[in-house]
Image: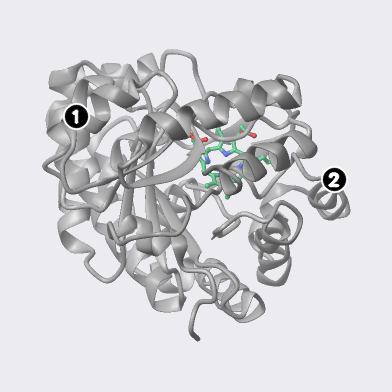
Amino acid sequence: MKLKNDLILKAAKGQNVERTPVWLMRQAGRILPEYRKIRNSLSGFKELVETPQLAAEVTIQPVDILKVDAAIIFSDILVIPESMGLKYEMIEKKGPFFSKTISNRNDINALNVSNVEDHLSYVFEAIKITKHELSGRVPLIGFAGAPWTILAYMVEGQGSKTFSKAKSFLYREPELAHLLLNKITEITIKYLKLQIKAGADLVQVFDSWAGILSPEYYEEFGLKYLEIICNSINEVPKTIFSKGAFFALEKMNGLNCETIGLDWTMSIKNATQTFNNKTLQGNLDPCVLYGDYNTIEKKTKEMLHKFENYRHIANLGHGVYPDTDPEKVKCFIESVKSYK
Ligand code: CP3
């Protein structure tokens, strides 16, 4: 089906666009009362993720309500560890929890990297339904977690401020860490290719915990595997978002991807001088959306001005915070769309 709005794909490929496209990380979710209504009628987050018709419905909500230029499939990065054999729970007000974690070679050998087509069939089904129901209104973004971020959850077993258990695994057991990262990379490539086959028009890889590693360790345990993923996927444009990895931007210029996500701590001026032949995505501080309407408009336009004449997809510098007023989100989107 031909896309009626392909701004984000054009921007990703560096083609001319009549205006900057805009979407938000975590746009499908708790900010919308329409989402909470569906979510509260179910046993929990996982039921929503695993019910393709409902996952498709909440994927499309931000397109209808917020008028963003792309949809992102409603799922989670943690479906990959689950497919490999580590079941996760999503605990209300706390976040993800794994009762089984990875600590030795046997644990890694027991992981399964095959059958992702069956294990995660609900994701591919949700993508197919979403594509059908979008009927070409906007492109659909598929996604996965980066190998380092997935390792962090598989070793740590839950969210953490420092992820010191996961980080110490890299120092104590570097060889095992590489063994695990290779397995995650292998399944992630299969997973992204299946999302593309099901209909994803573009894919984003989230390295949410990039910023807690030293530059040397991020190169060895992070970027190395992002490079393999980028070189293995050539079907659609790819975005790499390494949160907090300002120290790695120069190296990331060498990645075989179209777009680099920037968080709000990264200098736009610095980034536009560092990269060549890439599109940049981001990077408004999500907290700007707690400001009043004038502040949101002003800060959004200042950001757009700094990206002027540079390939750009407007977004926040990380996911939108759950207690953000949807009207403020609309103000951000409108400010991008009306920018001249
Ligand atoms: O709108 C979208 O962006 C698509 C859906 C999406 C979710 N998670 C849904 C979700 C995406 C792209 C993700 C990615 C994700 N998941 C990341 C990478 C992006 C980032 O934020 O850094 C990470 C680290 C996770 C792991 C995860 N999932 C955590 C730590 C949590 C708990 C904290 C939180 O944000 O609530 C989740 C839960 C989760 N994933 C929710 C949603 C809508 C909230 C669940 C609910 O209560 O409904």
- Name which of mark 2 and mark 1 comes first in the sequence: 2
| Residue on which the image places disc 1 | 273
Residue at point 17% right, 22% down?
Answer: 217
Q: State the scheme by which the image is colored.
A: one colour
Q: Is residue 332 left or right of residue 144?
A: right
Asked if one can make out residue 116 in the rendered structure from this viewpoint, the answer is yes
Q: Residue furthest bottom?
A: 1
Q: Is 291 rendered above or below residue 305?
A: above
Q: Secondary structure at mark 1?
A: helix
Q: For the residue marked with disc 1, what is the amino acid?
A: Gln
Q: Is residue 275 left or right of residue 18?
A: left
Q: Is mark 2 within 8 Å of ligand 1?
A: no
Q: Is residue 194 left or right of residue 23?
A: left
Q: Is 291 rendered above or below residue 69?
A: above
- Residue 206 lies in what quarter of the image? top left
Q: How far across and how far down the image is residue 241, in percent?
A: 36, 39
Q: Residue furthest front?
A: 340
Q: Which mark is residue 243?
A: none
Q: Is mark 1 within 8 Å of ligand 1?
A: no
Q: How far across and how far down the image is residue 187, in percent?
A: 30, 58
Residue at point 65% right, 26% down?
Answer: 296
Q: For the residue marked with disc 2, what is the amino acid?
A: Pro
User: Which residue is at the front of the view, 38 or 11?
Assistant: 11
Residue at point 50% right, 67% down?
Answer: 139
Could you classify mark 1 by the number of other residues whose Cα lies within 10 Å: few (under 14), some (14-19), or many (20 or more)?
few
Distance in Å between CA atoms under marks 2 and 1: 41 Å
Residue at point 52% right, 44% down?
Answer: 340
| Residue on which the image places disc 2 | 33
Of badges 2 and 1, nearer the viewer stands 1
